[in-house]
Image (cartoon, rainbow, N blue to C red):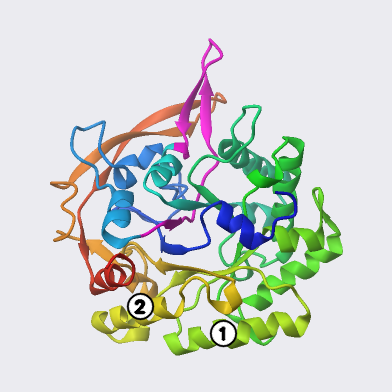
């Protein structure tokens, strides 16, 4: 499949007809401090937090919350948009056998078994490292993530459930806001693939996520065009010339919260016209954070109505055939946030009427990896709440759009 377009690549990895959900399943007692502890990395897509997303609780004997199963069965979701994703951690025993302390393969396999795909995020933690000039640490972080996705076997294919790379979240709003970091990550991915013999048909699409802020007379796409300019000046991205990498790998993602008529005009008129005006081949496009806050909508009923209209305006196949679909923002309300950010979400902590899992709220026992002063990894015992989540009106809007 040498030379397949980015759209063809998306079809190959089942991410060209997206009914997605932005997913950040933090427990109710989470606080985003970044301090050492169970919630340090804000990565919940791993074995440490399996009772949030997984189908059952093995440790306690109680059913877990089974978020992924709920999203697939109740909402018709087929794509999970992830955020913070830490590098995997393993401990090597005296026998030479490795024991995984933190891994994401189980999460991806669960997605795959349910007919869903997920993003593999190169999270903003890596951009922070690059912004501080810690290039070696950033590259090591990326390469550990890449190795987990492709494994150590002779035949390099991504773990089932892996749908596309995601490079940062709204890079142009974070840390030093430099597009050169995006290009660095692209290069390192392509170089790792080439060095490890990943065949062309096993190389994932590469999604660049931007905000919907105005730049160069267009929402979102101006920030991506800045990345493209640096890409072309670099000349080569691993084995690719820059123009080929753009055509064969890049997916454009942005985050509109505008009313449906404006979204429709963006996809039908403004976005295609922008690429055409600059003589740039149009990449596949998707929305990763579709929705509106209560401040934007007025109340929860209107928030749900607006979401229904936004979903209808964002269907796959639009924008001259390049629209992949949209991810609704967000799975849950975040009580630790402030202002408008607190009011997004399809669910909130409370008794649900649709799912009934877990059968009763409980604290799940777990272990998370800690690096000690002697230079080794060990496991710290901890627990976190696994609680029912009640449906907001926006939840039914998604049911009506994708499941009915």
Q: Is there any visible trace of residue 113 in the rendered image?
A: yes
Residue 54, given in percent of the width and then of the height, sits at: 32, 42
Comes first in the chain, label 2 or label 1: 1
Q: Quadrant of residue 368?
A: top left
Residue 102 among magenta residues: yes
- Residue 183: x and y in percent read 73, 59
Residue 354 sits in which quadrant? Answer: bottom left
Identify the mark at residue 268; answer none if there is no mark: 1
Q: Residue at x 69, y 44 (%)?
A: 139
Q: Give the x, y percent position of residue 119.
A: 51, 53
Crowding at dot 1, Cα within 10 Å, few <14 / some 14-19 / many 20+, comes out as some
Whether residue 132 is visible here, answered yes or no, is no
Quarter of the figure with the C terminus: bottom left
The outermost residue toward the front is 1
Residue 357 appears left or right of 380: left
From this view, report whether residue 126 is shown above or below residue 363.
Answer: below
**Which mark lies nearer to you, 2 or 1?**
1
Q: Position of residue 65 (x, y in %)?
A: 25, 47
Question: Measuring 42% from the left and 62% from the top, which residue is drawn there?
Answer: 20
Looking at the image, residue 233 lies above or below residue 380: below
Q: How many numbered marks have been drawn onto this rendered protein structure? A: 2
Q: Is residue 305 left or right of residue 34?
A: left
Circle 1 SS class: helix
Residue at (73% x, 72% y) in the render: 281
- Viewer-nearest residue: 370 or 155: 155
Q: Compare residues 240 and 140 and report the one nearer the observer.
A: 240
Seen in the image, is 8 located left or right of residue 312? right
Q: Which range is magenta? A: 77-105
Instruction: Give above or below for 281 relative to 102.
Output: below
Which residue, given by chain and number where applicable, does mark 2 sit on?
A: 307
């Amino acid at each position: 499949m040498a030379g397949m377009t980015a759209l063809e690549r998306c079809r190959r990895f089942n991410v060209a007809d997206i009914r997605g959900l932005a997913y950040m399943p933090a427990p109710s007692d989470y606080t985003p401090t970044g301090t050492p502890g169970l919630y340090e990395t804000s990565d919940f897509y791993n074995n440490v937090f399996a009772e949030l997303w997984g189908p059952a609780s093995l440790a306690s004997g109680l059913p877990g919350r089974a978020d992924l199963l709920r999203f697939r069965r109740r909402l018709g979701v087929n794509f999970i948009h992830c955020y913070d994703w830490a590098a995997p951690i393993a401990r090597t025993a005296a026998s030479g056998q490795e024991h995984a302390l933190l891994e994401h393969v189980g999460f991806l396999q669960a997605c795959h078994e349910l007919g869903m795909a997920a993003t593999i995020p190169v999270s903003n933690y890596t951009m922070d490292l690059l912004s501080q000039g810690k290039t070696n640490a950033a590259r090591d972080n990326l390469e550990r993530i890449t190795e987990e996705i492709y494994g150590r076997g002779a035949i390099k294919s991504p773990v089932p459930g892996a749908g596309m790379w995601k490079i940062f979240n709204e890079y142009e709003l974070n840390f030093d806001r430099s597009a050169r970091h995006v290009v660095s990550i692209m290069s390192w991915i392509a170089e790792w693939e080439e060095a490890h013999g990943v065949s062309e048909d096993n190389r994932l699409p590469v999604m660049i996520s931007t905000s919907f802020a105005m730049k160069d007379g267009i929402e979102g796409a101006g920030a991506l065009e800045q990345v493209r300019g640096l890409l072309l000046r670099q000349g080569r991205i691993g084995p690719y010339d820059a123009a080929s990498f753009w055509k064969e790998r890049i997916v454009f993602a942005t985050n509109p919260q505008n009313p449906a008529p404006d979204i429709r005009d963006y996809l039908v008129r403004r976005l295609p016209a922008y690429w055409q005006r600059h003589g740039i081949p149009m990449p596949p496009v998707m929305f990763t954070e579709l929705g509106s806050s209560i401040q934007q909508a007025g109340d929860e009923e209107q928030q749900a109505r607006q979401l229904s209209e936004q979903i209808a305006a964002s269907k796959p196949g639009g924008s001259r055939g390049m629209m992949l679909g949209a991810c609704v923002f967000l799975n849950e309300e975040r009580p630790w946030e402030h202002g408008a950010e607190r009011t997004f979400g399809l669910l909130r902590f409370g008794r649900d009427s649709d799912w009934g899992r877990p059968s009763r709220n409980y604290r799940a026992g777990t272990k998370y990896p800690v690096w000690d002063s002697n230079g080794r990894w060990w496991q710290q015992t901890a627990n976190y709440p696994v609680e029912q989540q009640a449906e907001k009106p926006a939840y039914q809007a998604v049911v009506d759009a994708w499941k009915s």
